[in-house]
């Protein structure tokens, strides 16, 4: 066997690469880069958790490893197996339409029952006299955690936001402390007492006065995994609580150490971000709590419902894996959303049917191909100007085309959801086409003609086909 991933040193990666090239390895295990292993005759490519967005390379050379695996297998007459408990909409559509073969596993291992899932409507606690503005754990979830601890069982709490508080606000004018490099609010981290940008890494100490109105009384609002841990220690002082997110897993081997302590029952409650949803198998975990299902649901992304359904289903699968039945509590302000109802009922078919109906109406994948043309520049004015020129050029190209122009829709140019990131102002143009060949031809024409527009402008064009990061 050989292993390929980014955590290897250059020397280690070179040694593995040479072993594969010499034919000394029969199997390669690794992350998306392992797809390019120098096998002379690959016969089988397995993409585990094929729905995972981490298979998409977003920087520099953009590619989707799952789709690239299909292409490589086709070139070498190999077989591809895409495995997932919550398949991506594209892959499942390919399966039901007959392009892919479909194999289903309708039962859990050893025919164990799926966990019982309860959805908690957080709006019902807003008028409660015991509710607080910063309430994090609902009374039903608090009761379930207490019962789990009393029975000496383990629990996992999932919240896809790290830090202590999401915002650091002025109580007088409402201004939040923002990152100077990115147009996002800084997240307050209690450990270290600093404000951190989760995009560029900018870090400062919390200011004493508001930069806008110069008044004091700034206060953190919202919550992240760090604050959940503090709340648990306050409510359950005897519980052994650990946190698993990027802030606590910075050192090599830390993930393994935390999971080892949890597997050896040295931890009662594990709080974490997406790291805790990934295929862990702990027989004594009988409770999973989702602190806020709305974080992924309200993202400006056409895949928001799909991502939410997948996250909820994956984290729910961490409980009830032993002989004892599992229990899941999902806290949300949108209890009637179809993605949450389908996750509650373990009904992928219902979710797929509803989601594909919406996507067909809106002409989104898998019923179209899309590309995101993102323009990045140091000046907001110049970036906007170049984006407008690029939009006009696309319009002219479409007018000249004799075929396919009626199958193409151009959205934008508009400011990106995060208008400034790592010091670069961002504009984007989204292009949708029902026929991939027309989109490919348009992108080639745009790429050829972009040099003249971008020349000496200080603005850079990135073309991302099948984008997964819409922010």
Image (cartoon, grey):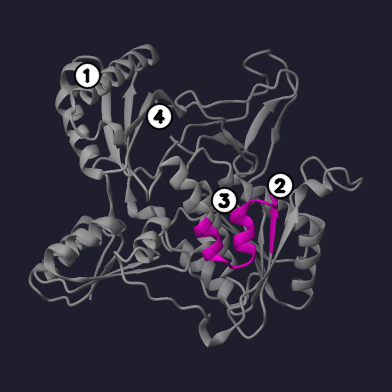
Can you identify the residue that label 2 sits on? 333
Identify which residue, 433 or 194, lies in the foreground. 433
Q: Point out the image quarter for the C terminus.
A: top left
Give the residue drawn at x 59%, y 80%: 283
CA separation, marks 1 and 4?
Answer: 20 Å
Sort mark 4 into few (<14), some (14-19) or many (20+) by Cα contacts within 10 Å.
some
Residues at marks 3 and 1 touching, judged by CB atoms closer than 8 Å: no
- Which span of residues is magenta-colored? 329-353
Where is residue 269? Give x, y as percent: 66, 66
Nearer to us of marks 4 and 2 is 2
Whether residue 183 is situated above or below residue 135 in the rendered picture? above
CA separation, marks 4 and 2?
Answer: 32 Å
Examine the structure image and report whether residue 348 is included in the region drawn in magenta: yes
Question: Mark 3 vs mark 4: which is more N-terminal?
Answer: 3
Question: Mark 1 vs mark 4: which is more N-terminal?
Answer: 4
Give the residue drawn at x 52%, y 46%: 304
CA separation, marks 2 and 3?
Answer: 16 Å
Nearer to us of marks 1 and 4 is 1
In the image, which disc is placed on residue 422?
4
Q: Is residue 423 left or right of residue 293?
A: left
Identify which residue, 416 or 411, lies in the foreground. 411
Q: Secondary structure at mark 4?
A: loop
Can you identify the residue that label 1 sits on? 454
């Amino acid at each position: 066997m050989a292993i390929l991933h980014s955590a290897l040193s250059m020397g280690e990666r070179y040694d593995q690469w040479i072993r594969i090239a010499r034919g000394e390895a029969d199997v390669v295990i690794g992350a998306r880069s392992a797809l390019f292993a120098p096998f002379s005759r690959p016969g089988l490519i397995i993409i585990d958790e094929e729905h995972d967005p981490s298979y998409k390379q977003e920087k520099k050379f953009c590619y989707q490893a799952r789709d690239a695996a299909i292409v490589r297998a086709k070139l070498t007459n190999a077989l591809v197996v895409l495995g997932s408990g919550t398949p991506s909409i594209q892959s499942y559509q390919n399966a039901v339409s007959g392009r892919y073969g479909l194999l289903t596993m309708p039962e859990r291992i050893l025919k164990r029952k799926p966990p019982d899932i309860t959805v908690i409507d957080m709006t019902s606690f807003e008028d409660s006299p015991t509710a607080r503005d910063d309430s994090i754990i609902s009374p039903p979830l608090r009761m379930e955690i207490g019962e789990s601890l009393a029975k000496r069982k383990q629990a996992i709490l999932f919240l896809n936001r790290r830090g202590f508080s999401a915002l650091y606000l002025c109580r007088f004018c409402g201004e939040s402390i923002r990152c100077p490099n990115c147009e996002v609010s800084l997240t307050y981290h209690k450990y270290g007492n600093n404000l951190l940008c989760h995009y560029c890494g900018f870090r400062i100490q919390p200011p004493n006065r508001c930069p806008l109105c110069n008044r004091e009384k700034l206060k953190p609002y919202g919550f992240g995994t760090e604050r959940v841990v503090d709340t648990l220690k306050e409510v359950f002082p005897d519980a052994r609580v650990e946190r698993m997110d990027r802030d606590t897993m910075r050192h090599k081997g830390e993930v393994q150490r935390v999971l080892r302590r949890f597997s050896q029952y040295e931890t009662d409650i594990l709080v974490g971000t997406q790291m805790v949803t990934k295929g862990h198998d702990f027989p004594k975990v009988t409770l999973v709590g989702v602190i806020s299902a709305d974080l992924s649901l309200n993202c400006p992304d056409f895949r928001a419902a799909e991502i939410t359904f997948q996250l909820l289903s994956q984290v729910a699968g961490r409980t009830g894996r032993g002989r004892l039945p599992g229990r899941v509590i999902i806290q949300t302000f949108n209890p009637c959303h179809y993605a949450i109802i389908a996750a509650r009922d373990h009904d992928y078919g219902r979710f797929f049917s509803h989601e594909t109906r919406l996507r067909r109406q809106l002409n989104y994948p898998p019923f179209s191909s899309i590309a995101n043309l993102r323009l990045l520049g140091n000046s907001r004015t110049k970036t906007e100007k170049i984006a407008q020129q690029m939009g006009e050029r696309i319009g002219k190209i479409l007018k000249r085309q004799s075929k396919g122009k009626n199958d193409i829709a151009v959205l934008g140019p508009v400011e990106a959801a995060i208008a400034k990131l790592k010091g670069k102002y961002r504009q984007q143009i989204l292009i949708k086409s029902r026929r991939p060949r027309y989109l490919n031809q348009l992108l080639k024409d745009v790429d050829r003609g972009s040099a003249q527009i971008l020349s000496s402008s200080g603005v850079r064009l990135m073309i991302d086909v099948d984008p997964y990061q819409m922010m």
